[in-house]
Amino acid sequence: MLKNKSIIAFTIIISTGFLSAQFTEKRVKKAPSMNTLKESCCTAFGDVLHASAELFSSLANVQSNALHAVEAYAHGDKKGWCATASREKLSTCEKKLQSLHARIEALQQECKDTLRSLQAS
């Protein structure tokens, strides 16, 4: 008998909690303050500065290697990268360079879009 009363009491408590939750006012999440937005925007600017410096360094290394390979190929150098690379290595390189080119174009477009949005402010 006591067990049945406990089950009934538990059921009533759960039902009451569920029903009251239906009618309670949901709090609207407050937007971040201007100071918080300014700070996070400046942090994002800094992150872009650091990441772009590393990107420029990586691109410079790719450019240097590409320039040496193209020069050697243009001069008919038998020891140049293109002359000594296997078919598999040439195929892999071509795919990676095409992928890199597509990503660079996408990044350029994103930079243009970002600058437009910054200038619109």
Image: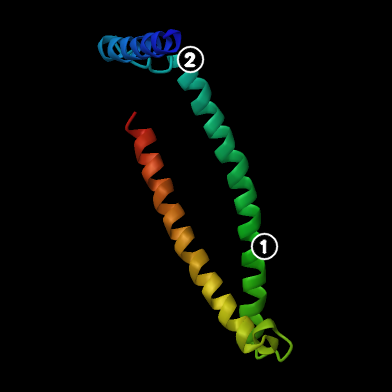
For disc 1, the neighbor class at 10 Å (few under 14, some 14 to 19, many from 20) is few
Judging depth in this view, the residue of 111 and 90 nearest the camera is 90
Quadrant where the C terminus is found in the figure: top left
Name the residue located 46 percent from the left edge and 21 percent from the top edge: 37
Question: Of the numbered discs in the image, which one, if any, rests on residue 35?
Answer: 2
Residue annotated with mark 1: 61
Question: Of the numbered discs in the image, which one, if any, rests on residue 13?
Answer: none
Name the residue located 49 percent from the left edge and 67 percent from the top edge: 99
Which three-letter amino acid code belongs to the residue tagged 2? Asn
- In this rendering, the answer to whether 79 lies above or below 38 is below
Q: Position of residue 3 (x, y in %)?
A: 45, 12
Direction from residue 19 to residue 35 in the image, left or right: right
Quadrant where the N terminus is found in the figure: top left
**Helix, strand or loop at disc 1?**
helix
Q: Are marks 2 and 1 in contact (CB under 8 Å)?
A: no
Dot 2 or dot 1: first in sequence order is 2
Q: Position of residue 4 (x, y in %)?
A: 40, 12
Q: Residue furthest right?
A: 79
Which mark lies nearer to you, 2 or 1? Answer: 2
Judging depth in this view, the residue of 116 and 89 nearest the camera is 89
Which three-letter amino acid code belongs to the residue tagged 1? Asn
